[in-house]
Image (cartoon, helix red, strand yellow):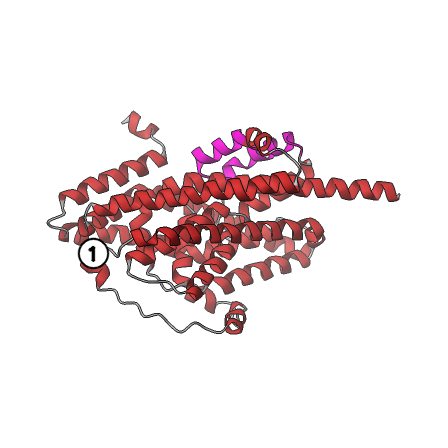
Amino acid sequence: MKFAKKLSLPVWIFIGMFAGILVGLCFLKNPAFTTDYLKPIGTIYINLLKFLVVPVVLFSIMDGVISLKDLRRVGSVGIKTFVYYMVTTAVAVVIGLILVSCFKGAFPALPSAELSELTYEAKEAPKIMDVIVGIFPDNLFAPMVKADMLPVIVIAILLGAGILSAGEKGEKIAELVNCMNEVIMRVLMMIVKLTPVGVFCLMANVVAVNGPEIIGTLALVIGIAYMGYILHVVLVYGSSVRLLSGMSPIKFFKGLAPAMICAFTTTSSNATLPLNIECCNKLGAEPEISSFVLPLGATINMDGTAIYQAVAAVFIACCYGIDLTFAQLATIVLTATLASVGTAGVSGAGMIMLAMVLTSIGVPVEGIAIIAGVDKIFDMGRTTLNITGDATCALWISKLERRRKAKANIQA
């Protein structure tokens, strides 16, 4: 009993996954048991994830905007930071889509009767201006009720900016938002603790219904995601450190290694934040910049999560026999980029954002069950990628600020 209590959540998730695989193999000839008795429990877990999508996005983004404290602080530093994060995230999604598109021929539609009964008709792609107009809501609550995430993100940003501009009168609301965000994070952690049970039930049903071939397919998907992580680190972050910050990539990765290891083991950007700030300061980042850019990055910069969403979305679509159109792939880029802004810096939150991406392209959210059992493996790599991207931005902005101060001193 004491030994069981000492096991960490990731270990329990792995145990749940392997136990689910074994149980699923035992019921290959009689999947009705897992469908009737285990799948409903997994469905409850999925429903809880879907329930959290709107509040996590709304309050985490509002709290992130409010954390800037003064709209004037956004200034040049805030804009450059935001643009850097959004560009690298968009590149990450594209890398993920290119990689998974190269391998999607190895993802045959699952042969289960349950999946084959689900029909999908591609809707006519809306005009680009209609999409842009639709992002800006004409009702405060309608997008939340419909879980229409793009308008919810816009609402969160506008409300956060409004609270800041309200000055003293907005401080009470800001404190309330901060408290609500903390409450939502606590609820999130409660649900995350249920993951081993949800994973066990979902994996058992997936294997029992679809057969053991799904296991090998999942291994391929994990490999593709990690290929994307590595390519992004080498091509994007390596180039950023060398060209923008003027630092040797080897020196950078060596100095950031403690934070990267911490992120890989804790799978939490927030938990890694103090160590990440310390490593960046030792690498030459300005303390006032790292203390601003890194916390902001822990909230809005999720390159690893973006790659994961791109790979997982295409894989799940293939499992349902859905051939995504160019418009839908473009929607993944847009939605995953904006979704990364609302991804909380805690373990397991990426799966909640995946639900949003799947909804935006018309792929059944229930497909998350297919990869839920191995989400922790994805999470280790994507969290490491996330905090690495935060550090590259802090070093670049620090260099720009040093140049600006030097130029101001010369002019003075």
Compared with 96, 360 (above or below) is below
Q: Position of residue 10 (x, y in %)?
A: 36, 36
Side of 123 relative to 240 (left or right): left
In this view, which residue lies farthest toward the top?
A: 2
Q: Which residues are magenta?
A: 257-284
Q: Position of residue 111 (x, y in %)?
A: 20, 56
Q: Quadrant where the C terminus lies?
A: top right
Residue name at image x 39 percent, y 56 percent:
355
Q: Position of residue 208 (x, y in %)?
A: 18, 48
Between residues 351 and 252, which one lies in front from this camera angle?
Answer: 252
What is the chief secondary structure element of the magenta stretch? Answer: helix
Side of 313 relative to 390 (left or right): left
Residue 66 can be seen, yes or no: no
Compared with 401, 151 (above or below) is below
Q: Quadrant where the N terminus lies?
A: top left
Residue name at image x 64 percent, y 32 percent:
281
Side of 227 relative to 215 (left or right): right
Side of 230 relative to 249 (left or right): left
The residue where tag 1 is placed is: 111
Compared with 239, 360 (above or below) is below
Secondary structure under tag 1 reads loop
281 in magenta: yes
